[in-house]
Image: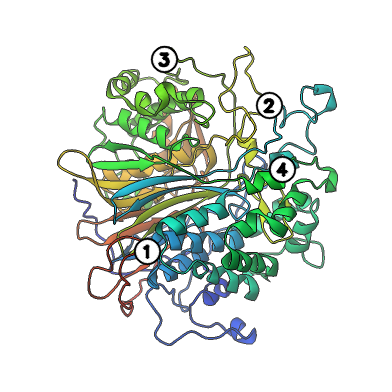
Amino acid sequence: MKQHSFSHSRFFATGAGVLAASLVLAGCAQSPEEAARGVAAPAANVPSCAIPVDDETFLPGDDVNEDDDIAVNPEQSSGYRSGMKVVEFADFGAVTANPTATLAACRTLQAGGTAADALISAQTALGLVEPQSSGLGGGSFVVYYDAKTGETTAYDARETAPAAATEDYLRYLEAGNAAAGAPQPSTRLSGRAIGVPGTVRLFETLHEKHGKQAWGEPFNAAIRLAESGFSVGPRLGGQLASGIDNIRRDENMSAYFLNEAGETHPVGAVIQNQAYADTLRAIAAGGADVFYTGEIAQNIVDSVASESGGRTAGMMTLEDLANYRVIERPAVCDNYRDIGVCSMSSPSSGGIAVSQALKILEHFDLSGLGPDTGALDGGIPSADAIHLITEAERLAYADRDAYVADADFVPLPGGSPDLLLAPDYIAERAALINMETSMGKAEPGEFPDWDPSGLYADVENGTSHISVVDSYGNVAAMTTTIEAGLGSFHMSRDGFLLNNELTDFSVEPADANGTPIANRIEANKRPRSSMAPTIMYELNADGSHGAAIGSVGSPGGGSIIQFVIKTIVAMVDWNMDPQQAVSMANVGAANSPRTNFDAGHPLAASDEGLAIVADLRSRGHDVSVSAQGSGLGALLRTSEGRWAGGADPRREGIVLGGAIDGGDGGDGGGDGGKPNEPRKPERVDTDIS
């Protein structure tokens, strides 16, 4: 395969939004604030996962757009951290959208945990410090490479509609009765939006299949932090401020997110969540069943049924929770040039759409169309590259909109992704691209005996992403969500927010022509998603997949597919390191004339950027120059056998990792040998200017 031989500094900490109270509790040196609060100082021999307290950490800007509609734009802009440098580590590491979560994952890996253990640590931390994006009340997709078996599995922990849901559940208060009116105060803010959460059951599945630590161990960092307190970050602070009116509708949200003056907690305020700590402690002691039955389950049902603030109740029951199951699915796997790629399968459309677009792009030579070598923050692709990428995406989204939903209810053409990814079919789709003119909106492909479903305009939102590699060679990609920012604005008394994931279904069961919509809501169905947690592989001589060499994914709703594609293209076609690739300007398109161009990138308004936009418009692109709310995380093995990572400069995330002295760090599986003690840290490079 191609040698990814980019250069980078010896060791790292990519500074970013590091909030002292959070990080010290997770294991860094003690701050005066914590000393006053009685937090114990760590050992003098600070391990390699630590971020030094003398780091002049960079807080992302809080220049949010006050005109944002939180129902449509759930993740507000956090500015852009220009100049971020790639992070390199030897054996284990993680990247998440929040420093506290990355540190929790890194500590778990350092203690000998697997990637599965680290995902649990990261997610439980994210549910506390970044509750607007994911948590116990939401759902997740994981693609997991087990180095011991060489197998890759996709885990589907997507939320489900309750058994009482009908095709009118999201649009009428009474099935078949339009005169009864719509859910109040809106579908998203009503109990009708809330799906049965899957993330806690996913913890159990991952741990049983791939875990190494004792079941309760990965929960400990989040428990300690919830009890001791954490600082409100800029993203959370901005989300709370913009959502205050809806927070006030919910008693539990008001009690937690509002201060004594009745206002939301400001950035930097230290808050505690004892209820969340108690919930995690109960799950750690009794397993996932504690969440899906008994008092915690009853509290979820009560929150869904709440009519406070004029909200319509949902119909979730204790049986819905008790019956929830994680589904193991085959990943969507293919090759792109000289690497293998596996991503998430149905009910996510992400894996199929990413693979389709990449296979279409294989018909074109992109190698000379990338940004100039060494361009600031990864630069901006050429107009030709953007044209090709967005046209390939239009074709992929057209098929996704017409054919992809929960395959347990609406089978894919031919019953698998194979027809959508067949070489002859891909070649036909690629031939539709005209270098001089954008197609604007693509038509879906045609398959004998398979009619496309009705189409509808949908908006997907929210989410967070975690990428992990452990010292045993396991690699994981997890994209996790509660849908829109702060979910449904329903909070369980047990300290976590509930999703509004059912709004990812089509509200209408059929289109204007009466054709049933594949992604219509049905009882126990899982809504379609764009989440695309993706793992990359070296290729064997026969083209089969060898060992995993990378992990990538992003939040961003319906644009996730675009963010993942641009990052893979940057690393494969343009030999960028992971930080350059995620920092590079976001460009992409769904199936519409609009082409997204990243206004948040430092070069967007440069002469180069303006010329690229003008070129695209001359080809018929309706270019939308606006900030792109990605939260990419990427890890990639270097040609020297180390690992490199990049965190999205548009959010607060960081990369952390470390090394194990001696040996090979175990046999690659959940039953592998215990790693040796961590190496003393090398010099940490904190320069992010």
Callout 4, which amino acid? Met
Callout 3, which amino acid? Glu
Q: Is residue 227 above or below residue 567?
A: below
Which of 245/211 is in front?
Answer: 211
Is label 4 in contact with label 3 (beta carbons under 8 Å)?
no
Relative to 133, 594 lies left or right: left
| Sequence-first tag of 3 and 2 | 2
What is the count of numbered marks? 4
Q: State the SS at label 2.
A: loop
Distance from disc 3 to disc 2, alpha carbons, whole Å, reads 27 Å
Q: Residue at x 22, y 72 (%)?
A: 663
Instruction: Report the quarter where the C terminus lies.
Output: bottom left
Q: Is residue 583 visible?
A: yes
| Sequence-first tag of 1 and 2 | 1
| Between marks 4 and 3 in the image, the one whose residue lies nearer the viewer | 4
Which residue is under mark 3? 446
Which residue is under mark 2? 167
| Between marks 2 and 4 in the image, the one whose residue lies nearer the viewer | 4
| Sequence-first tag of 1 and 4 | 1
- Disc 2 packing (10 Å; few <14; some 14–19; many ≥20): some
Q: Residue at x 79, y 53 (%)?
A: 250
Give percent across and percent down for residue 4.
23, 52
Instruction: Return the mark for residue 316.
Output: 4
Distance from disc 1 to disc 2, alpha carbons, whole Å, reads 44 Å
Which residue is under mark 1? 93
Distance from disc 1 to disc 4, alpha carbons, whole Å, reads 39 Å
